[in-house]
Image: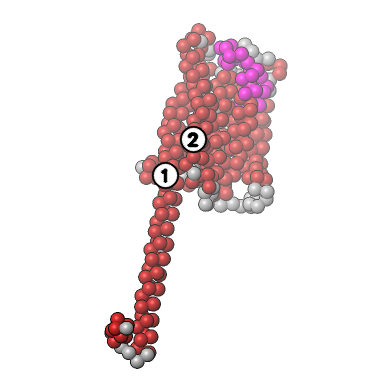
Amino acid sequence: MGTEEDDLFTDTQCLLLVCSWLCIWIAAHHLAWFVWQRGRVPFWHMSALGRYQRRLCRSQVYCAIACVGSVDLLGQCGWNASDLLHKFSAEHQIFFTMAVAHWLLSIWEDAQCASFLGAGMSQDLAGVDPSFILAKAYLVHHAVACLGFYLITYLRSCTGIGVFGLLYELPVLLMNHREFAVCREPRPAWMHDLSDLKRLWELLRILFIVGRGIPSAVYLYSVIFWRDELLKLPYAEAAVYHVMAVFFTVLNFHLMDILGLWKQSDFLEPNRTIEARLRAQACIDGSQQLASDAEVGGADDSDGEGDVANGEAPGRADARSSTS
């Protein structure tokens, strides 16, 4: 079946692995952002924004490891039903228990900074408070992902679902990069440049197709061409395989809607900046015009005062000027 029992961790050892990874991720939550900022931020007590930045920073670490791990595990197997359903090793257990701990901690992290989860999404576009809705959606996602990785580890089967679950983090690397920029005040210059924004979203579209589209395509392929192998799966394994694949494929379509709203919000920001600059320039121009008019009026008043000082009425001085 592709599983070498003697080389695998026991169920108890897997629980210890989850606890170990949880300790590692808690340490990373506090250390990663502190190290990235070279000690310029508090190590322990932070605002909600600081906790949000810690969440993003630790997520980047996990996503990078998960993507590398998925490529490594996919490289070790043949793209066939036997390997993607049953090939299981201690390396799979290490990466899958890492994912369990990550999603457990992510639930706590999101609760610490829920007001920032909207990530710059315009409430006018969303129609509701985006942070509130996304906090609920993330809770469901994290719980299902955590349970799914745990069941795959416990059943020692459906490894393809777990490996592709690690690959799912590929577009998240760029999504986190964008969120770092959105939460900065002021936003970095490239967030106000339409060309840079287009490049960001085009690259994100490519990563989304590779990291999310390909796994969903493999699942559809398996349903059509691996029907006999899938029918041989025990009930629990078949349930995990299909429920996880369908759930996250459907979730991807909802995520595409969210990405669309984020994209619209991003492209509205440069326009708001341009409009603000134009309004500010108009105010400056208006102020300069008023100042110029005031100077001209002041000069005319000065001429009149000079004539009076010379003992002539302003009208008489003008008459004398025209006579001469």
Residue density around tag 1, few if under 14, some if 14–19, many if 20 or more, within 10 Å: some
**Residue depicted at 56% across the width and 52% down the height:** 47
Residue 164 on the magenta segment: no
Residue 265 drawn at (x, y percent): 43, 42
Q: Which residue is mark 1?
A: 268
Q: Residue type at mark 2?
A: Trp
Q: Secondary structure at mark 1?
A: helix
Q: Which residue is mark 2?
A: 201
Residue 200 drawn at (x, y percent): 51, 36
Q: Is residue 270 visible?
A: yes
Outermost residue toward the top?
228
Q: Which residues are magenta?
A: 71-97
Outermost residue toward the front?
324
Residue density around tag 2, few if under 14, some if 14–19, many if 20 or more, within 10 Å: some
Q: Is residue 307 left or right of residue 72?
A: left
Q: Is residue 110 visible?
A: no
In this rendering, the answer to whether 217 lies above or below 59 is above
Residue 209 drawn at (x, y percent): 50, 26
Q: Nearer the viewer, residue 45 or 237?
A: 45
Q: Is residue 303 left or right of residue 37?
A: left
Q: Quadrant of residue 104?
A: top right
Report how far apart the C-alphas of labels 1 and 2 lie in the structure.
Answer: 14 Å
- Of the 4 image quadrants, the one containing the C terminus is bottom left
**Residue depicted at 51% across the width and 40% down the height:** 196
In this rendering, the answer to whether 141 lies above or below 11 is below
**Residue depicted at 65% across the width and 34% down the height:** 21
Q: Secondary structure at mark 2?
A: helix
Q: Nearer the viewer, residue 247 or 194?
A: 194
Residue 236 drawn at (x, y percent): 52, 18
Residue 77 on the magenta segment: yes
